[in-house]
Structure formats: structure tokens, C-alpha cells
């Protein structure tokens, strides 16, 4: 949506869920929605397309909740991915898959045929290039050294929208479902000099802190270069730093990562 909008296209984003990015925290979703409105991107949530018709070089989309159809030149359907494993004939090699087509593997990526490993998009795990690379390294070591290691590291999740979004560790909804008591600490980029220099001081960075231990359990960033800044938060969660230890780390001024020391 932000990609095509930046080229001057009039964009309408139709979302089945009740909010943008249904897996992310509500405050991140709302911040992105405000940014979309500033970019004149129309967002329809809780909307389901019932029918599409091509007429006179245009597409008419009929949505249950709207009386008049939406008319557009191009429709881009981005409703998720499925593994392309149907033509592998992996069953002949004794390799099992689940009902969705994902190859079944152990925690160390061994398939049901013990001499075959599977990683990346063909297994039911994070669909990221960086996790596939990490899995490949682990599998190579497991094969060479006869080990059974797996990924136990914190994995950063990044959305390259405008503004960028990056998260890692425990989300607020996950903490609630797991009955983990957390305190959310936040800092806004309006307080960050480098963000103002870059011409975009919208958004924020936040951490979820365990009330009992003070340890950083999760983080979320929406704003300029979030995809770069998030790695500092990954280290904090990976190494079980307390919020006090994390925010007291000295940062160069002016820098975007300096947002850390304003979190409270």
C-alpha cells in the first residue's frame, strides 16, 4: 500500500480483520493507520470481498459491508503464502507433510526420514529470510557434528512499510494470554533529534518489562529506520537485561537508536 501510494497511485486497502496487522499490538496498528491516512491511503477493516467483476477495463469489487462497489484499475491480492511442495514427491522418500503442505520436522529440522532435513519456507516456522539463513547454519552443523541444535534466539520481525515496523520478543497480547504481568515503557520519536533531522519524527519505541524481575521481555518500534534499531532491543531481550540496564546504555547523539534512553 505505501509502495504504490508513494508513486502517486490512489490506494484502498481492504482488511478482513478488525485492525491493521492483526498480530501486532493495538497501539502499533493505530499508529500505522494514522500514517496511512496522512498518505491518503483508504483503509477498510472488517471487510470481506464477495465478488469481483471486470468491466470496461476496470475491476468492481463488491464488499458485503458497502452498498456501492469499489472501482479500481488493478487488484493486488496479498492474503498470505502456502508452501509449494506439491510437486516435490517427498512422500516417495518417506518425508511427511501436514494438511497444509508443510514438511514435518523435529526441533532440529530433521524430517520424518531421518537423513533428510528441511528449513525455510517449506516448514511451518517464521517465513523470514534471516531465520532460513540461521536454520541453514544450524542444520549444516548438525549434519557435520551429529548434533541436534535448534534456534533458541529471539527473532526480529520487520514490516518494511512507511513508517517501518519492527518487533521482537513477547507481545502485549501474548503476555496477557500467558498471565505474565508486564509494564509497558515507551518513548516517542518526537523527542529524538536525529528523527527530526531525517524529517520524520512520528511513531515510538516501547518495551514490555516483567513486573516481577524488571527484565525486558518484548519490544516494538514504529517509525523511521525501525528495521535497524530493533536489533539493539533483540540483544537486550536475548541477554535478559533489565529495563534499567538497557536504558542506561550510552548512545551517540544525535542518533535514532538514542530513543532507547528516553524510554520510561
Image (tube, rainbow, N blue to C red):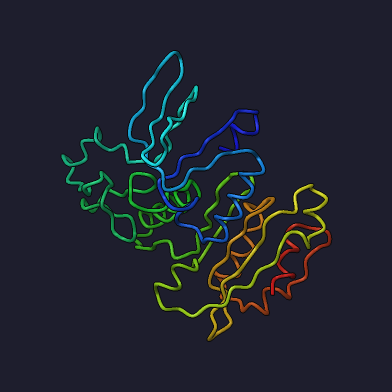
Specify whether 161 is left or right of 44.
right
Tell me the quarter of the image containing the C terminus.
bottom right
Specify whether 138 is left or right of 263.
left
Q: At 45% across and 67% down in the image, what residue appears?
A: 173
Q: At 61% across and 79% down in the image, what residue appears?
A: 242
Q: At 43% across and 61% down in the image, what residue appears?
A: 151
Q: At 55% across and 85% down in the image, what residue appears?
A: 213
Q: In which quarter of the image is residue 91?
A: top left
x, y percent for residue 16 = 40, 46
**From what the image shows, is residue 186 above or below residue 144?**
below
Specify whether 260 is left or right of 61.
right
Specify whether 206 is left or right of 138.
right
Which residue is nearer to you in this view: 112 or 187?
Answer: 187
Which residue is nearer to you in this view: 58 or 142?
Answer: 58
Q: In which quarter of the image is residue 218?
A: bottom right
x, y percent for residue 167 = 55, 59
Which residue is nearer to you in this view: 123 or 229?
Answer: 229
Amino acid at each position: 500500500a505505501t509502495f504504490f501510494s508513494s508513486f502517486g497511485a490512489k490506494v484502498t486497502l481492504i482488511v478482513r480483520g478488525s485492525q491493521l496487522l492483526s498480530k501486532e499490538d493495538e497501539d502499533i496498528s493505530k499508529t500505522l493507520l494514522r500514517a496511512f491516512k496522512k498518505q491518503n491511503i483508504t483503509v477498510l477493516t472488517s471487510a470481506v470481498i464477495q465478488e469481483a467483476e471486470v468491466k470496461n477495463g476496470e475491476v468492481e469489487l463488491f464488499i458485503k459491508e458497502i452498498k456501492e462497489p469499489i472501482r479500481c484499475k488493478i487488484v493486488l491480492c496479498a492474503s498470505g503464502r502456502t508452501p509449494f511442495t506439491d510437486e516435490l514427491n517427498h512422500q516417495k522418500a518417506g518425508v511427511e507433510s501436514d494438511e497444509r503442505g508443510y514438511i514435518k520436522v523435529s526441533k532440529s529440522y530433521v524430517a520424518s526420514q531421518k537423513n533428510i532435513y528441511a528449513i525455510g519456507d517449506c516448514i511451518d516456522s517464521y517465513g523470514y529470510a534471516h531465520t532460513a539463513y540461521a536454520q541453514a547454519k544450524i542444520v549444516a552443523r548438525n549434519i557435520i557434528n551429529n548434533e541436534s541444535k535448534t534456534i533458541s534466539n529471539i527473532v526480529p520481525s520487520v514490516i518494511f512499510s512507511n513508517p517501518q515496523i519492527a518487533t521482537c520478543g513477547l507481545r502485549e497480547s501474548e503476555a496477557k494470554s500467558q498471565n505474565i504481568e508486564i509494564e509497558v515503557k515507551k518513548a516517542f520519536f518526537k523527542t529524538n533529534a536525529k528523527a527530526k533531522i531525517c524529517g520524520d519524527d512520528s511513531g515510538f519505541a516501547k518495551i514490555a518489562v516483567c513486573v516481577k524481575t524488571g527484565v525486558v521481555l518484548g519490544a516494538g518500534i514504529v517509525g523511521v529506520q525501525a528495521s535497524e534499531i530493533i536489533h539493539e532491543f533483540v540483544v537486550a531481550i536475548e541477554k535478559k537485561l533489565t529495563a534499567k540496564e538497557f536504558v542506561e546504555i550510552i548512545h551517540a547523539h544525535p542518533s535514532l537508536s538514542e530513543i532507547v534512553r528516553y524510554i520510561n
